[in-house]
């Protein structure tokens, strides 16, 4: 009917959508894991999402356990979030100037990331992606210390800036890429990668390079090589050793922040410590900088970094460390973030925990019933499964699993109408919109998937 335009007709199937996308987008995607490379098959192209469901171009709906890779803790398109976004949009999409709502969001973050009324977040800067948040945190660490080197852990993912792609998790783990072409040897050499959960490795790297190390960056709980929580006391040790050598500790809570607890993994850990030791209810470890993303933007492009005023005020315009962004603090994104955080109350976190507990237990039972060797990995309400007989401690352990079992498991679930992360190296993300009926449907799909994994 449209004879005046050269635009091809709207694609009807996922395969047609993918074929067309590959003609103009590298690999047909704008972020690698979306291409289904490690699980094979045709990626689903979505047209809408609501509550716990996503719907593809073929009109088929799936129960979603990806949840936009973390942001959608309330489920998709929560009416109050959508309303806040629509209202903000109607007032203008961006001004390139400050808005009162940015201050409100920063104050809300400071109030939430606190233990016993004390917050390590005295100042916050809003950026648009987690990658920018970690990139800026590292620049701040170098600016604050005048030092060069950065320490990171193998299997931890901190976004795609040059210095952070060495032995990273997430898509690089999925694609078995040890690093990225296009990163100069000089840049790569400034990142020292050590084994996770290994105190001796941490001590050694500081013994050898301590005077030259600007900071250590770590996921508060690793969740980009599948979920792998720190060993008890490990985060505390990171912060202590960094401080002994005058380096900064940067806790990356892009994924865990506002998801595992209202105060992130740091808050979860501090609360557990306070229960264990009521005489000393303060946090045992306090990083110098926190990075946030995902939930803080409620599904819109928004992220942040925060810490003490002393360090954060090294940022321009007050200090010598430059950082800026046309879209930073975008009013529509801030509206989504504010609405999401305001709705994420104790009831939401207790629902997330409950859904995660049921699904991880039921999945494990289904795998066991088929004799599939596995370990369930938890960090708060984040979880995933390692196809291995022994508890992993680090990236090498995770990579040694029988990862080939995941693709058939994933596809069986997808056939049953459940969308899991398309990689064994990713966490499963639940939402508070996963009601009991939806959880039952997921559980019903598990036996067939476990059988497929066993084959
Ligand atoms: N840090 C962590 C822990 C992440 O999980 C991610 C993304 O998954 C990032 C940083 C990068 O965030 P973004 O994808 O928004 O750039």
Image (tube, rainbow, N blue to C red):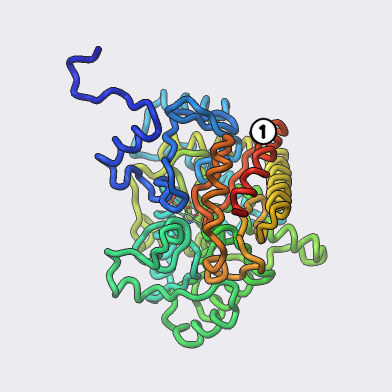
- Which quarter of the picture shows residue 120? bottom right
Relative depth, front residue between 70 and 238:
70
The percent position of residue 453, horizontal first and vertical second, equals: 60, 52
Residue located 58% across and 41% down the image: 413
Q: Secondary structure at mark 1?
A: helix
Query: In this view of the protein, can residue 345 be seen by the observer?
Result: no
Which residue occupies the extreme front position in the image?
Answer: 455
338 vs 358, nearest the viewer: 358
Q: Residues within 10 Å of mark 1 (few under 14, many from 20)?
A: some
Q: Specify the quadrant that holds the N terminus.
A: top left
Q: Is residue 125 left or right of residue 263?
A: left
Residue 156 horizontal side relative to residue 356, left or right: left
Residue located at (57% from left, 70% from top): 397
* Residue placed under numbered mark 1 in the picture: 438
For the residue pair 236 and 351, the one nearer the viewer reads as 351
Can residue 179 be seen in this snapshot? yes
Tell me residue 299's x, y (percent).
49, 39
Q: Residue at x 56, y 62 (%)?
A: 402
């Amino acid at each position: 009917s449209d004879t005046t335009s050269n635009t091809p007709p709207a694609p009807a199937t996922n395969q047609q959508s993918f074929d067309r996308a590959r003609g103009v987008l590298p690999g047909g995607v704008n972020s690698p894991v979306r291409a289904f490379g490690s699980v094979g098959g045709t990626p689903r192209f979505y047209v809408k999402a609501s509550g716990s469901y996503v719907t593809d171009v073929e009109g088929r709906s799936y129960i979603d356990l990806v949840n936009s890779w973390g942001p959608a803790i309330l489920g998709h398109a929560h009416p109050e979030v959508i309303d806040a976004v629509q209202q903000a949009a109607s007032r203008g999409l961006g001004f390139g100037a400050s808005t009162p709502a940015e201050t409100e969001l920063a104050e809300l973050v400071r109030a939430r990331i606190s233990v016993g009324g004390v917050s390590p977040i005295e100042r916050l800067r809003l950026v648009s992606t987690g990658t920018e948040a970690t990139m800026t945190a590292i620049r701040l660490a170098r600016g604050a210390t005048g030092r060069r080197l950065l320490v990171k852990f193998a299997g931890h993912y901190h976004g795609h800036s040059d210095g952070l792609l060495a032995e990273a998790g997430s898509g690089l783990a999925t694609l078995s890429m040890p690093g990225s072409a296009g990163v100069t040897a000089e840049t790569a050499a400034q990142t020292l990668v050590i084994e996770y959960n290994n105190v001796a490795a941490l001590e050694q790297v500081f013994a050898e390079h301590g005077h030259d190390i600007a900071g250590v960056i770590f996921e508060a709980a690793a969740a980009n090589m599948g979920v792998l929580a720190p060993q008890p006391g490990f985060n505390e040790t990171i912060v202590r050793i960094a401080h002994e050598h005058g380096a900064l500790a940067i806790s990356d809570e892009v994924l865990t922040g506002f998801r595992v607890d209202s105060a992130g993994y740091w808050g979860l850990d501090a609360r557990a410590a306070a229960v264990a030791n009521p005489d000393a209810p303060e946090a045992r470890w306090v990083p110098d900088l926190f990075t946030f993303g995902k939930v803080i933007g409620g599904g819109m492009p928004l992220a942040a970094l925060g810490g003490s005023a002393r360090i954060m005020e090294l940022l321009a315009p007050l200090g010598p460390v430059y950082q800026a962004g046309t879209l930073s603090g975008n009013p529509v994104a801030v509206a989504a973030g504010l609405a999401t955080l305001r709705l994420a109350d104790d009831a939401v976190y207790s629902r997330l925990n409950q859904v995660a507990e049921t699904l991880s237990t039921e999945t494990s039972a289904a795998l066991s019933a088929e004799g599939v060797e596995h370990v369930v990995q938890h960090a708060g309400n984040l979880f995933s499964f390692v196809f291995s007989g022994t508890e992993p401690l680090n990236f090498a352990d995770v990579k040694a699993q029988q990862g080939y079992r995941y693709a058939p498991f994933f596809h069986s679930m997808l056939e049953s109408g459940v969308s899991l992360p398309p990689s064994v190296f990713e966490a499963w993300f639940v939402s508070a919109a996963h009601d009991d009926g939806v959880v039952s449907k997921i559980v019903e799909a598990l036996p067939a998937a476990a059988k497929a994994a066993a084959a």
